[in-house]
Amino acid sequence: MRKAKQRNTALDYEVVLLAAGQGKRMGAARNKILLNLIGKPVIAYSLSTFLNDPACKHIVLVTQEDERELLNTMVKKETKRKDTPVTIVSGGSERQYSVYNGLNAMYDSKNIVMIHDGARPFVTLAQLKLLHRKVQETRAAILGVPVKDTIKRVVDGIVEETVPRETLWQIQTPQAFYGEDLLAVHEYARQEDYLGTDDASLIEKYSQLPISMVLGSYENIKLTTPEDMLIGEAIVKRKRS
């Protein structure tokens, strides 16, 4: 009897989806990822995108302890017809600690892992596929877009120089790595009590891995301020039309 062909899961990935922020700059009374964006919580958009990616085998949703029940209810609604398992874990006092908690909930640290901010609702399946392909080639890959504005270095309110923008990129998420590589640099950072600006900065500091840049989208914005919510609403309306 011919054996059934098994799916090669070596190239699948897990994702740590960060939803433990407080949204202070949003000026909201609740976590910004729970704010309503045209009929859905902000976090539901990126959660749905990962649920619809066949290469995503496990979602680790990192949230605040007192919001676990709310997130669990939302997850049940979004996953009603999906097979991808979702694990909810509590975050830490800093984003970096939340990522670390999420990494420790992975099924297998040898898997590829993507780190994504839940406050970026507009990442697309096409971007996930590009990022997923690149990380398999280089072990570290991040999304970003070239800087469009003129950038100046300012000290004490005085312009010191205009920085050439040809080599400057605005970094987004997801960022993709192999779990064991990212866990290793997080452990080094914990030993030195070092906080990086993003996960790629830990790879830069504690690893020799080259980090590949993958072109993202100017629509893949992070909803941080009330003005961002207005832009987000416009993006949702355009996509739906």
Image: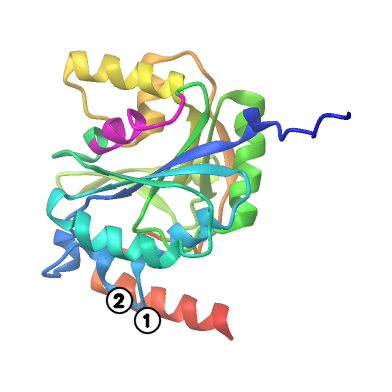
Q: Nearer the viewer, residue 105 or 204?
A: 105
Residue 21, can we see it? yes
Is 34 located above or below residue 207 in the figure? below
Residue under label 1: 39
Is 58 located above or below residue 25 in the figure? above
Q: Is residue 157 magenta?
A: no
Please state, as top left, top right, bottom left or bottom right, where the C terminus lies in the image.
Answer: bottom right
Query: What stretch of residues is rendered in magenta?
Result: 98-108
Secondary structure type for disc 2: strand
**Residue 36 numbered tag:** 2
Question: Splitting the image into 4 quarters, where does residue 75 fall?
Answer: bottom left
Q: Seen from this angle, which residue lies furthest bottom?
A: 241
**Distance between the Cα atoms at labels 2 and 1?**
6 Å
Q: Position of residue 229 (x, y in %)?
A: 32, 74
Q: Seen from this angle, which residue lies furthest right?
A: 1
**Left or right: 52, with 42 as reference point:** right
Q: Residue at x 16, y 20 (%)?
A: 193
**Left or right: 7, with 54 as reference point:** right
Tell me, yes or no, whether the two marked residues, 2 and 1, touch with CB atoms within 8 Å: yes
**Residue 140 numbered tag:** none
Q: Is residue 99 magenta?
A: yes
What kind of residue is marked 2? Asn
What kind of residue is marked 1? Gly
Please state, as top left, top right, bottom left or bottom right, where the N terminus lies in the image.
Answer: top right
Q: Nearer the viewer, residue 94 or 14?
A: 14
For disc 2, the neighbor class at 10 Å (few under 14, some 14 to 19, many from 20) is some
Question: Splitting the image into 4 quarters, where does residue 212 fall?
Answer: top right
Q: Position of residue 213 (x, y in %)?
A: 57, 37
